[in-house]
Image (cartoon, rainbow, N blue to C red):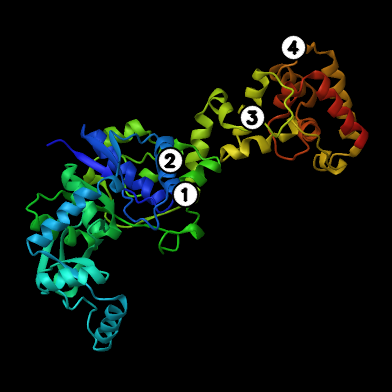
Amino acid sequence: MVVRVRFAPSPTGYLHLGGARTALFNYLFAKAENGVFILRIEDTDKERSRREFEEDIIDSLNWLGLFWDEGPIRQSERIDLYEKIIKELIDKDLAYYCFCSKEELELRKQEQLTRGEVPRYSGTCRNLDKQTVLKRKEKENYVIRLKVPEKIITFKDFLRGEIKFDFRQSGDFVIAKKEKEPLYVLANTVDDHYQGITHVIRGEEFILTTPKQLLIYQYLDWQPPIFVHLPLVLGQDRSKLSKRHGAKSINEYRQEGYLPEAILNFVALLGWHPAGDREIISLEEMIKEFKLEKLNKSPTIFNISKLNYFNRHYLKTKKPEELIDLLDFSTYINNYSYEKILKIIELGKERATTLNDILPSVEFFFKDFDYSAEMLIWKNTSREKIKNNLEEIKKEFAKIKEEDFRAEKIKEILDRLSGNNKGEYFWPLRVALSGKEASPPPFDLAEVFGKEKTIDLINKAIEKL
């Protein structure tokens, strides 16, 4: 059997972490089993589906590197197929037209609740004759319902084992608004069959839909796929994951400066874990290790700190050459060579959590800055001592040839001058060159600024003192 799986989002919103996780697990399973990964856009909801959401889903998957083998297949282009299946179910007397209004249905629902019953469709239109149906179809609105047996069925979920569902509690359910307007429960089932889907890997929220879909498989004499329902992703307070927990769309994370490698690594561990205790794992390594049996059965917790940890790791592994095109220098005055820009990126990324942190952390290279004279003072060192130390540094720097003004040489001088009192030299120079208490080492800053600019900034600091 060739494994065939699909990621089937509805373009009614942007791609979020939960959807990305579903896409990733389907992708990993397909690649691990030399199977086929399909992208299907379930856009039959005309009111809520929007092209911008579809484009976001596609762009986000491409950015993450989750490339599909077939697709994108759009349900809106397959309406004739769904209509054919709906008519087949009606002709076999397995589905029927229902003319009950929303008001009627709500009234019966309230009556059932008052009697302490589980709300379910009472079957008012179940046995209408064909002539009555034809007449009412011309004048009234209708939906199409599937006839449901009065029994309990049991189905097997790959992760959860046997699950029971009591159809006596559900009643006949709607499969389409009209012949050309199928609902998810029908269109999704039809597509899975005709696209040869072998495994349906999706979120736990679809468990209650599964028995309804299995009934359609049974009525049409189709072989159902293996169902794998992924556990929920919860917030830190164990409630349903939402924006208040820090969850955002994939594109929002991208705009905030997160890397695709970090997102994938983070999402993969929301319900799965590689062998051993390691947490850092590439997409290629995931494919080698991925097994459905290793998926968690219990809910997993979203932790933004963990995502930040992964992003810091992957940022540090990136070479400046890989990051330069991802950073926006347009708001900065750029008077540096390409080599120095790479050096600036290297210095900025050391303390960065996201791409967006890099340039602001080294903006003193591009903008004028100021600071108080008190910032230059190291602990209890006297103002006069700090001033003399800066004069000493300036004097030594002036002796260095421009082409030799490099971090190694500068550090060598600072080490010699400071001896056992490094703070009295390194600290004021750091502040003088950055205006900050926390920055890259002053010898690295001096190299980027160059000899002339470095001495100018030291003079500024001396004047402040």
The residue under the point 66% across, 31% down is 329
The residue under the point 44% across, 36% down is 63
* Nearest to viewer (mark 3 / mark 1): 1
Name the amino acid type tagged 1.
Ser
Q: Relative to 379, is 152 above or below?
A: below
Compare marks 4 and 1 and give the one earlier in the sequence.
1
- Name the secondary structure under disc 3: helix
Which quadrant holds residue 94?
bottom left
* Nearest to viewer (mark 4 / mark 1): 1
* Label 1 Cα crowd, 10 Å radius (few <14 / some 14-19 / many 20+): many
Q: Relative to 82, is 324 above or below?
A: above
* Nearest to viewer (mark 4 / mark 3): 3
Residue 172 visible from this viewpoint? no
* Cα distance between the residues tagged 3 and 2: 29 Å
Judged left or right of residue 430, residue 35 is left
x and y percentages locating residue 249 in the rendered image: 47, 49
Is there a contact, CB below 8 Å, between mark 4 and mark 3? Answer: no
* Residue carrying label 1: 249
* Residue carrying label 3: 347
Compare marks 4 and 3 and give the one earlier in the sequence.
3
Check residue 60 in the rendering and tell me which mark sits there, or answer none.
2
Check residue 404 in the rendering and tell me which mark sits there, or answer none.
4
Is there a contact, CB below 8 Å, between mark 1 and mark 2? Answer: yes
Is there a contact, CB below 8 Å, between mark 3 and mark 2? Answer: no
Question: Between residues 118 and 344, which one lies in front from this camera angle?
Answer: 118
* Label 2 Cα crowd, 10 Å radius (few <14 / some 14-19 / many 20+): many
Question: Between residues 204 and 299, which one lies in front from this camera angle?
Answer: 204
Location of the C terminus (image quadrant): top right
